[in-house]
Image (tube, rainbow, N blue to C red):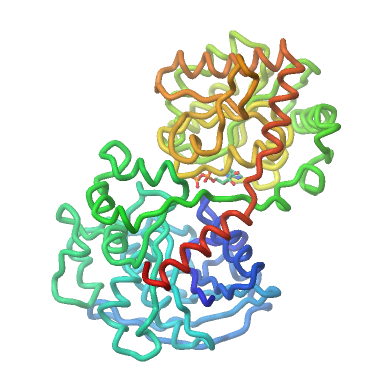
Amino acid sequence: MNVLFASSEVFPFSKTGGLADIASFLPKALNGIGHNVITVTPYYPSIAKYHNDLEYLGTKTVYFGLDNTKVNYYVLNEGSNQTIFVQNQHYFEREFYYGYDDDDIRFMVFSYSVLELVDLLKDIPQIIHVNDWQSAPVPFLLDRHYRYREKYQYIHTLLTIHNLQYQGSFGLYSSRLFNVDFDYTYVHFNSVNYLKTGIETASKINTVSPNYRNEIMTEKFGFTLDGALKNRENDLYGILNGIDLEVFNPETDSLIDKNYTSSNLKLGKQKNKEELLKEFNIEITKDQPLVSYIGRLAVQKGINLMKESLEDIINDSNAVFIFLGSGNEEYQNYFQSLRDKYPNRVAYYQGYNEELAHKIYASSDIFLMPSEFEPCGLGQMISMRYGTIPVVREVGGLKDTIDPYNKYNNTGTGFSFYDQNKDVFKDKVLEAINMFNNEPRKWSQLVRRALNEDFGLERMAKEYTDLYNKIIGGK
Ligand code: ADP
């Protein structure tokens, strides 16, 4: 099957979150089972270091409103995987990926560029698979401006929503960029809304876990688009993300201090823990559990709940804590002051650090993910791969991936709660810590069950293949 996969970020070239991981894992997994999936993404300054390996493919002019600009396409070939970078210095070679006043223009240029690229490809894609708001205008533009061309006649589209909160919402003036007479397809509450445009026009839509798929059709989780999604209920799917079990593998991971298997996990974790915490000037004894958080410091991630309860948990337990992330300034200040107040118990690294993330996953015993909402979440799956037990809120993909511990029949793979209440959260974290401290046998059994979960890419690739087939078959 020929697929053109468009994403505004692709690991390792660019990354702000889980989208980049999936945009890297999924095309590779699909190519691994014989499909031909080509990835297309903007050429940001971070791509420059690959420039000598790139091959020039061609140049196109894209038109938006009364403006136009030229884009160059460069190809990176890595075995059966092809990534094509859309180069336009003015729009994409900036310090940050997002957050500019002209983001509406920047990602409309990207969307047109995805469509123009089809003309340069050897194989016409059967499906253009777009991701999130940054390429969500593609299905609409395809129908309005490209269908009449022979190559574009039969192309289908799939929109994957990785996070409904970010919609690409702009003033009505942005409507000029679609190059059509005013049309309500792209209007939502008196704004132009790129994601809604995709929801209305893509052949099919999916999101990144079955539970989030159901949640987003409700007012509570719908971010005002629940109605638009409900209208397309029959075309809306939920496919759980996967993780690359080779990249995240405690047996072979070269970024961690000591590799380990399920049989020497305890010792391996202990060694990793000591090395990691040495860097933060914290001494840890054998019986102290390490509790961690890795992720964006955003409201979505349940940081408010952590703010309300972490000090109590520190005071009521023997655990040591490590936090990795950046984002909201108020949260950054909070973690800094927590570290300053408890220098022997709390480590905090502000920023993005891939290597440190691996070290933390490998060293921790307990991983916190009390998200307010969570489309899928990768952190909890990566944790389990390293034998680290997640404590999660029962929302979105967290609910799909964690089987809550049941002390009566000794089953489950983690701890979970629903109420956004500081005591409920605190009690769950303390329950995990206490079990680590007082019931080592049960803890090892829990860890083993978590380790045995398979969140690999094969299942995900198969489910996307099935969905592609449905789309092409017109089902
Ligand atoms: P989201 O996409 O909402 O940010 P996910 O859990 O889906 O959250 O994916 C986050 C990914 O980014 C995980 O692979 C996580 O390990 C990684 N990550 C998040 N923050 C950091 C950080 N500060 N340093 C290194 N890796 C990070």
- Please report the residue visible at 29 percent of the width from the left and 61 percent of the height from the top: 194
- Above-or-below relation of 12 to 92: above
Q: Which residue is drawn at 63% across and 56% down?
A: 458
Of residue 448 and residue 385, the one placed in the foreground of this image is: 448
Q: Position of residue 414 (x, y in %)?
A: 60, 27
For this rendering, which residue is in front, 339 or 241? 241
Q: At which x and y percent is residue 314?
A: 59, 14
Image mark count:
0
Image quadrant occupied by the N terminus: bottom right
Which residue occupies the extreme bottom position in the image? Answer: 150
**Left or right of residue 416, residue 323 in this image:** right
Q: In which quarter of the image is the C terminus?
A: bottom left
The reply, left or right, for residue 258 in relation to residue 425 is right
Who is closer to the viewer here, 73 or 405? 405
Residue ID at (50%, 63%): 466
Where is residue 227 drawn, in percent x and y?
A: 22, 49
Task: Report which quarter residue 386 is drawn in.
Answer: top right
Image: 80 above or below 315: below
Where does residue 147 sit, x and y in percent of width and height?
31, 84
Residue at position x 72%, y 13% in the image: 439
